[in-house]
Amino acid sequence: MNAAVDSKVFKANRLNAGLDPEHMPEHIAVIMDGNGRWAKQQGFMSRVRGHEVGVEALRRITTASAELGLNYLTVYAFSTENWNRPKAEVDALMNILMTALEKELPTLMGNNVRLCAIGNVETLPSKANKKLMSVIQATAKNDGLTLTLALSYGSQDEMVQAIRKIAQKVAEGTILPADINEAAVEQHLFTAGMPHPDLMIRTSGEQRISNYMLWQLAYAELYFTPVLWPDFDATGLYDAIAAFQKRERRFGQTTEQLTAE
Ligand code: IPE
Ligand code: IPE
Ligand code: MG
């Protein structure tokens, strides 16, 4: 199937899914969870198979998001806490990251996707970090979807680093304590310049945030699905967006105020 036909199929799917093109989320954040349970369920001896198949799910969701015209997709790929997993699993995850970065560049280019990363990427093995930087550079001029990988990311750590940077500026006298406001904090987060997620999807049935974008999710709509990440597909994404479109986002106001506007 060529790209033009492919795009028509997706547009048709969007209509079939009943999505309202006027109320699409600008930014979707995803906690890609359930790889280990998927591998177990399928009878694989190792959890690693789930991570490998999880890359395919990420490709599907990235392509579907690009076809829907979303601006930002930010996925939790490896948390600061995930370093505490058995070394063999951490090593396997780093190898999968390397292989995926090598393999997925044509798909990213074909979908006009710009790759970014948030987190302590310098703590990744140097080969993986270099590969990541090269794909970020290669896709930097793409102006479609921005796909951000949260790698060695922890939201509390992100905030600690932001506070430290701001404190340093206060100590140097370049910023006054009175000038520290929400915008100033924003500018010191890994996500500086990025809009906050409108919708956060977590797969695998867990209903928690697990140290993901605690600041940025302040007013996101949360959507939890029991589907395990390796099984998650475009239909699952459309369902999540359809659920999002049924929510009333009040941002502290009342329904009456919103309908009067
Ligand atoms: C998510 O799947 C991937 C990472 C955290 C790297 P898990 O590996 O957490 O899978 P479960 O939750 O144990 O099934
Ligand atoms: C969150 O999943 C991190 C990623 C998906 C990368 P975890 O599986 O690590 O989260 P917990 O431990 O169940 O909260
Ligand atoms: Mg998990």
Image (spheres, rainbow, N blue to C red):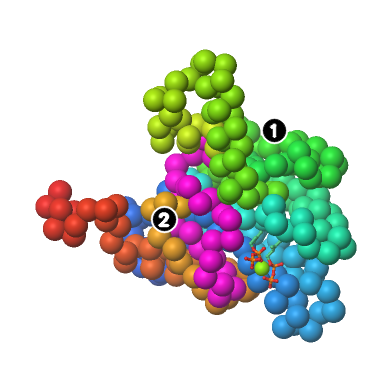
Q: Determine the secondary structure under disc 1.
A: helix
Q: Confirm whether the magenta stretch covers residue 80.
A: no
Read off the residue under disc 2.
Answer: 220
Cβ atoms at labels 2 and 1 below 8 Å apart:
no
Residue 103 in the figure: left or right of residue 176: right
Residue ID at (41%, 55%): 220
**Residue furthest toward the right?**
88
Q: Which mark is residue 19?
A: none
Residue 18 in the figure: left or right of residue 82: left
Residue 119 in the figure: left or right of residue 16: right
- Mark found first going from the N terminus, 2 or 1: 1
Mark 2: give few (<14), some (14-19) or many (20+) Cα within 10 Å. many
Q: Which residues are magenta?
A: 191-216
As displayed, is residue 217 above or below residue 188? below
Q: Quadrant of the N terminus?
A: bottom right
Q: Position of residue 177 (x, y in %)?
A: 44, 25
* Amino acid type for the residue under numbered disc 1: Gln
Q: Determine the secondary structure under disc 2.
A: loop
* Amino acid type for the residue under numbered disc 2: Ala
Query: Ligand 2 within 8 A of label 1's CB?
Result: no
Q: Position of residue 28 (x, y in %)?
A: 49, 54
Q: Position of residue 52 (x, y in %)?
A: 77, 65
Quadrant holding ligand 3? bottom right
Query: Ligand 2 within 8 A of label 2's CB?
Result: no
Q: Which mark is residue 137?
A: 1
Give the total number of marks visible in the rendering. 2
Residue 59 position by quadrant: bottom right
Mark 1: give few (<14), some (14-19) or many (20+) Cα within 10 Å. few
Residue 166 in the figure: left or right of residue 178: right
Task: Give the foreground label among 2 and 1.
Answer: 2
Q: Confirm whether the magenta stretch covers residue 198.
A: yes
Residues 16 and 182: in front is: 182
